[in-house]
Amino acid sequence: MTLGVRVIAVDPVGRVLLVRHTYLEGWWLPGGGVDRAETTSGAAVRELREETGLIATQSPRLLSVHSNEAHFPGDHVLVYRIDTYVVGEPTSHGEIAETGWFDPLDLPADMSRGSRDRLAEVFGGAETRLVW
């Protein structure tokens, strides 16, 4: 089994932070894999900092857990929310092409389906799907 995390970071005016990877099409929630001996909340904080430069100042809040079996057998993705942070420098080395803040109800057309679904669940009242 593998574990991954995605982070919904929200700014003071209610926008969400998305990333565009250098190796994937479209916009995604920041996140990645959980390292050995790392907690899932620790991975969420680390991935957010690495990919976007945001440094969480409070513990992230777990929102949901999803099976990603269709894309990666045995994989699960945990979604966290982080609302309190300070801005630092990203530390990913060439992994992120671009970051941007977006209204969660007016997302880019080329956003990943899983990320779009998670935001619809959190901000649009959609029923939570347990499959990524």
Image (cartoon, grey):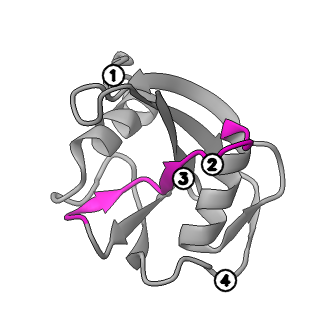
What is the secondary structure assignment of the residue under circle 1? Answer: loop
Report the predominant secondary structure element of the magenta stretch: loop
In whole angstroms, how far apart are the C-alphas of marks 2 and 1?
31 Å
The 10 Å Cα crowd at callout 1, few under 14, some 14 to 19, many 20 or more, is: few
Q: Which residues are magenta?
A: 24-40
Could you tell whether 96 is left or right of 54 in the image?
left
Among the 4 quarters of the image, the one containing residue 99: bottom left
Label placed on residue 14? 3
Label placed on residue 35? 2
Mark closer to the chain start, 4 or 2:
2
Q: Amino acid at mark 1?
A: Ala
Label placed on residue 85? none
Nearer to us: label 2 or label 3: 2
Label placed on residue 89? 4
Q: Amino acid at mark 4?
A: Glu
- Asked if disc 4 and disc 2 are in contact, CB closer than 8 Å, the reply is no
Could you tell whether 29 is left or right of 82 in the image?
left
Q: Amino acid at mark 2?
A: Asp
Nearer to us: label 2 or label 1: 2
Q: Where residue 57 sits: x, y (%)?
A: 83, 57
Q: Where residue 116 sits: x, y (%)?
A: 29, 42
